Image (tube, grey):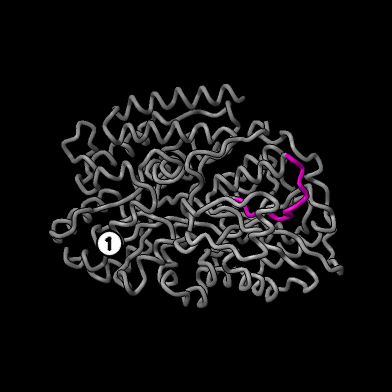
Amino acid sequence: MVDADSRKGKRNGVSRRSFVKAAGASGVAAGLAGCVSTGGGGDGNGGGDGNGGGDGNEDTDTPIDTEETTEEITIQWAADTRVGDAESEVQQALSNAGLPDNITVEIVAGSQVTDNRQAQYQQWLNGGREEPTLLMMDSGWTVPFIARNQLQNLSQSLPSEMISTIEDEYFEASVSTAKGSNGDLYGQPLFPDFPTMQYRKDLLRNAGYTDDDFDTWATESMSWEDFSRITKEALDANSDIDNGYTFQADVYEGLSCCDFNEFMTSWGGAYFGGRENLFGPIGDRPVTVDEEPVLNAIRMVRTMIHGENDEHALDGITGNIAPEAVLQWTEETSRKPFTDGNAVMHRNWPYSININGAEDVFGEDLGVMPIPYGVTPDEAMYEGTGGPVAALGGWHMTMNPNAPDRKKQAAVQVLRAMQDEQFQLDLFEIIGWIPPRPSLLDSDRAREVPVIGRYLDALKVAGNNAIPRPVTVVWPQQSGKVSQEVNNAMAREKSPEQAMSDLKSQLEQIEQSAS
């Protein structure tokens, strides 16, 4: 997914020339910052079963000389247009964080479309390319590269204190998407991304709610029952507003990885029997999409869209608060009605907080709260589900195992600088990327960042309750099945029971054929 300003698609001169020469620059920014692809991707040419192993470089565990290199050396960092557009500021931030002057980082600004980047990396790594040395990799598809043995094993290569910093101080959900089935780290989280629920304080004041309510909502998630009722009250109190709640439910990756993952998990449901099976083992984990918590999530959304008279409506949920158009909406199409002043509530990623909280939009009348919950964690069927669940997005730094040893040695110093708290706060100011350490969201400096700094309490709750998508080498196949059947059920083309029964069969077939 993309930031608003990354849609400009700029690349500065050197980076663009390098990228065109090396790979063929691909086009315009599309998609958005928190979430992966638009359903493409796939497992490329690599095999692998999602459980480690696979083809690719066999020397991924080779230790790296981590002493500071003294030679003049340039390494390439495959990043995106946001880094390319802010290259001088990012270079200065690395220098301020202690990157030695003899190491130059050349930014290779690739496509903002995450599927294109995934395919490009697959091509490079399958072909044994030595550069770029560092790859900025979507947390939504790092695990398949690990499973194919195509990334440097950082746990075996970096100093132990760098590994313990990541494991002890970074958002746990982010770290989990950078690990192999052996428990080793293959990526260093660069920034996480978490959705929240945005709302219009002015419209809710008209329905009788006050700043005391807004202060509470910032950190204390409300139930979906309360959310639906409050949204309807605000709709009724503001006759010129057409939409209560806007979100993303088109047939695309964002529904399966993110919106529905949140709905389902907040009710205590799971794709594969809980968090412990998120990343496999493929073919040896239960498929649990036909269970009651998952069905309740679909029933809830049907009620919100089609009303309480829907034959599969969920008791306790107030209906007719979401337009049927959500069934064709992705991030930007769902954001526009809210930004244009025609919705009460809106679920989206942090990039849109910066848009909607700007002074020429809603300013401080924009409220932000964690995603509502269906059941509390102690009521949930599976451990780690229930409560204010937020789908995990974000990106990692990974290392090309084919790079020459001397470049890997320099890359260690880059990764060390990126662990510096000052660098992480600089990136938050420069690009808007949330620091990977929860503790930094409590810092005075983070709170002073314009617009988004006002909403760090809600973002921290989201980060501490983040749920990754179940990424394995077969997830690209499974994701499309999920989004199609969930959309079918939400659109009333199938009953929740029939859609999830059909989905279970499809997911089981994919699991068995890959195991």
Q: Is residue 374 left or right of residue 285?
A: left
Q: Is residue 400 left or right of residue 238?
A: right
| In the image, residue 436 lies in the stretch drawn in magenta | no
Residue 243, image x, y percentages: 22, 53
Residue in front for this viewpoint, 125 or 22: 22
Residue at 58%, 44% in the rendered image: 141
Residue in front for this viewpoint, 336 or 374: 336
Tag 1: amino acid: Asp
Which residues make up the magenta segment? 127-137
Q: Secondary structure at mark 1?
A: loop
Say which quarter of the image contains residue 149: top right
Q: Please indicate, yes or no, whether residue 402 appears anywhere in the rendered image.
A: yes
| In the image, residue 132 lies in the stretch drawn in magenta | yes
Say which quarter of the image contains residue 66: bottom right
What is the chief secondary structure element of the magenta stretch? loop
Count of residue discs: 1
Q: Please indicate, yes or no, whether residue 167 appears anywhere in the rendered image.
A: no
Q: Quadrant of the C terminus?
A: top right
Where is mark 1, residue-wise? 340
Residue 502, image x, y percentages: 39, 24
Residue 342, image x, y percentages: 23, 59
Q: Is residue 433 above or below residue 443?
A: above
Residue 96, image x, y percentages: 68, 76
Residue at 65%, 31% in the rendered image: 49
Residue in front for this viewpoint, 497 or 126: 126
Q: Is residue 224 left or right of residue 242?
A: right
